[in-house]
């Protein structure tokens, strides 16, 4: 799973920290820190965190493809 | 605009703005060919953690990759910079000699950290920049050695990146000196009044803060390793690591000769993110998004500026995708917003504090605890910054949106009593960027 949090939108409510404390944490009183590429073992907790966020600041990856660098240029 | 399957969209710059444009295009139904060209060999990652959780040691640089919210079915040309643009031939040239044809083009090449002016000093081992993953890896390794040797870190420049680097170095237990040309850290963005308040809190965390001070010379030993810095106040410091954080330049050199209006300050575009030529005419089919875009925000009476804000890259990416896919041209008028985390402080700003002439403390106190400061320009509320109080910012954003008179009327329970606006003391370079259109308020 990959995630990103829009920290402009985040209001430091901390629901994500309660839902997945191995992925999200606070620095100081209000600064949210998180792992963008959490372990697969945390997937369910991360989904719960995203649902619990009152301002929907957490985006989950849904892409299934890998990035494959292309060698051939087209013209 | 038609969007036939034969349509080829090329995005130059495969980072936040480029990736978000690609995602938004696919989500809006774009079915044509999509190519992302990136100078870095890495797939898109997030930069803000580089100076924060990555540098302070929590996350590795492989733990800050950006998620993708849909399958892009894109071609990725990574690790190869674009070196030229021929808008007539509709072709982007790459460093390896290839050419990539496009029908529509998105410029999202962001910015680079400004280098130390003396190349020999910049080449000393121990002298670093911080913009990308590779920079962060090199700096981290050097900081780990500095921890062993208890060597001092010199941060040149007290803007956001410099201040965050200083904070992360303190987390590692390192002694840190920060030099700042002006009277206070963060002054370019927030003015000297608020910058000084934050500077005092930085000092409380053990930062040796030298304001109104510049670095005259960086000196190395016989092996080419940084040893000493000579400062404009006459002092010499034994330093092991120096981080040059003196601002950034937009990555536009490769656009020379393309007919676009582009220089160190960005590529000119309109509020709809359409590139402009020297006569301010829209260049058909060429769009600009993110740090590299230089434009006039429709909500502020200022000249063209670029916003080095994460949120701006996201907003402009969405505007570009919309305008490519739809007949109705949308302007990006989202309120600028950014955050910074340092020294246990959560700093959040909305609007354009950097163009203010006055500032007033609206909540809390500059000395301790949370506070909110509100910024005004010729009697109009133009911005606000909240320190350790992220939940109140929406209310202030509304005041900026409605162009409320400055100083604004604020809930008496929260305000510290008598509100006395003072000169915000934004240093000159920022104000000079701005063309004042008086009388519009
Ligand atoms: C250390 C650091 C901390 C930050 N912290 C914050 C923060 O706390 N809050 C906040 O709001 N913002 C923060 N920012 C700013 C934020 O990261 C940027 O606004 C955002 O990355 C802009 O995205 P972008 O895609 O426009 O540009 P960039 O992220 O700069 O990406 C541009 C990409 O284009 C590539 N490129 C350049 N030239 C070429 C070329 N000729 N051909 C092909 N590719 C090219 C580059 O290699 C790069 O990958 C921070 C930035 C840094 C560096
Ligand atoms: S739940 Fe949402 S708002 Fe609360 S801290 Fe987490 S991301 Fe921020």
Image (cartoon, rainbow, N blue to C red):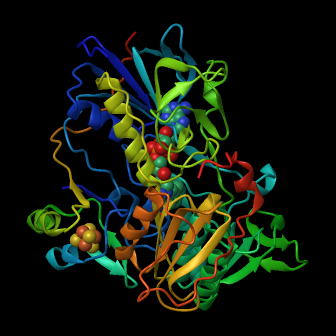
Q: Position of residue B96 (x, y in %)?
A: 52, 22
**In the depicted structure, whether residue B29 falls above or below residue B418:** above
**In the depicted structure, whether residue B310 falls above or below residue B273:** below
**Occupied quadrant, residue B23:** top left
**Occupied quadrant, residue B178:** bottom right
Q: Position of residue B342 (x, y in %)?
A: 50, 76
Quadrant occupied by the N terminus of chain A: bottom left
Which residue is at the far left? A44
The residue lying at 28 percent from left, 36 percent from top is B24
Relative to residue A21, is residue B113 drawn left or right?
right
The residue lying at 14 percent from left, 75 percent from top is A19
Q: Is residue B150 visible?
A: no
The residue lying at 51 percent from left, 68 percent from top is B384
Relative to residue B429, is residue B128 drawn left or right?
left
Relative to residue B425, is residue B301 drawn left or right?
left
Q: Position of residue B176 (x, y in %)?
A: 65, 80
**In the depicted structure, whether residue B288 falls above or below residue B86:** below
Front residue of B405 and B357: B405
Q: Is residue B70 visible?
A: yes
Q: Position of residue A51 (x, y in %)?
A: 12, 64
**Occupied quadrant, residue B365:** bottom right
Q: Count every numbered label the image shows and give the total.
A: 0
Front residue of B433 and B15: B433
Front residue of B440 and B186: B440
Quadrant occupied by the C terminus of chain A: top left
The residue lying at 30 percent from left, 75 percent from top is A12
């Amino acid at each position: 799973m990959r995630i990103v949090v829009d920290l402009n939108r985040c209001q430091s409510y901390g629901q994500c920290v309660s839902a997945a404390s191995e992925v999200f944490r606070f620095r100081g009183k209000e600064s949210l820190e998180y792992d963008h590429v959490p372990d697969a073992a945390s997937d369910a907790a991360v989904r719960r965190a995203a649902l619990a966020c009152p301002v929907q600041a957490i985006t989950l990856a849904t892409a299934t493809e890998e990035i494959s660098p292309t060698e051939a240029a087209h013209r | 605009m038609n969007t036939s399957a034969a349509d080829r969209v090329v995005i130059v710059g495969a980072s936040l703005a480029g990736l978000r444009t690609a995602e938004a295009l696919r989500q809006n139904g774009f079915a044509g060919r999509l190519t992302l060209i990136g100078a870095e060999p890495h797939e898109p990652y997030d930069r803000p953690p580089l100076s924060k959780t990555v540098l302070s040691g929590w996350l590795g640089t492989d733990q800050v990759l950006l998620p993708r919210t849909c399958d892009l079915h894109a071609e990725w040309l990574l690790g190869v910079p674009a070196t030229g643009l021929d808008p007539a031939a509709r072709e982007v040239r790459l460093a390896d000699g290839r050419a990539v044809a496009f029908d529509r083009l998105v410029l999202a090449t962001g910015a680079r950290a400004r280098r130390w002016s003396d190349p020999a000093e910049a080449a000393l081992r121990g002298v670093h920049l911080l913009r990308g993953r590779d920079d962060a890896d090199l700096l981290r390794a050097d900081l780990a050695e500095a921890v062993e040797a208890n060597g001092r870190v010199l941060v040149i420049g007290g803007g956001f990146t410099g201040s965050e680097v200083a904070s992360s170095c303190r987390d590692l237990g390192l002694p840190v000196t920060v030099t700042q040309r002006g009277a206070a850290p963060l002054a370019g963005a927030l003015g000297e009044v608020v910058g000084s308040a934050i500077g005092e809190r930085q000092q409380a965390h053990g930062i040796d803060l030298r304001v109104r001070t510049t670095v005259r010379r960086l000196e190395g030993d016989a092996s080419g390793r940084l040893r000493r810095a000579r400062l404009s106040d006459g002092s010499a410091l034994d330093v092991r690591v120096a981080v040059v954080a003196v601002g950034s330049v937009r990555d536009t050199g490769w656009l020379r000769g393309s007919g676009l209006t582009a220089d160190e300050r960005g590529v000119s575009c309109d509020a709809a993110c359409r590139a402009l030529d020297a006569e301010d005419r829209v260049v058909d089919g060429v769009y600009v998004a993110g740090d590299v875009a230089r434009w006039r925000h429709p909500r502020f009476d200022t000249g063209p500026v670029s916003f080095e804000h994460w949120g701006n890259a996201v907003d402009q990416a969405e505007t570009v995708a919309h305008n490519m896919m739809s007949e109705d041209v949308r302007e990006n008028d989202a309120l600028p917003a950014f955050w910074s985390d340092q020294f246990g402080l959560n700093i959040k700003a909305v609007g354009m504090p950097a163009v203010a002439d006055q500032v007033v403390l609206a909540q809390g106190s500059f000395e301790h605890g949370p506070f909110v400061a509100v910024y005004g320009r010729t009697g109009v509320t133009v911005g606000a910054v909240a320190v350790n109080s992220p939940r109140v910012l929406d209310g202030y954003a509304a005041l900026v949106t409605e162009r409320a008179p400055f100083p604004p009327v604020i809930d008496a329970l929260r305000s510290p009593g008598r509100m006395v606006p003072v000169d915000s003391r934004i240093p000159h370079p920022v104000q000079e960027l701005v063309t004042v259109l008086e009388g519009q308020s």
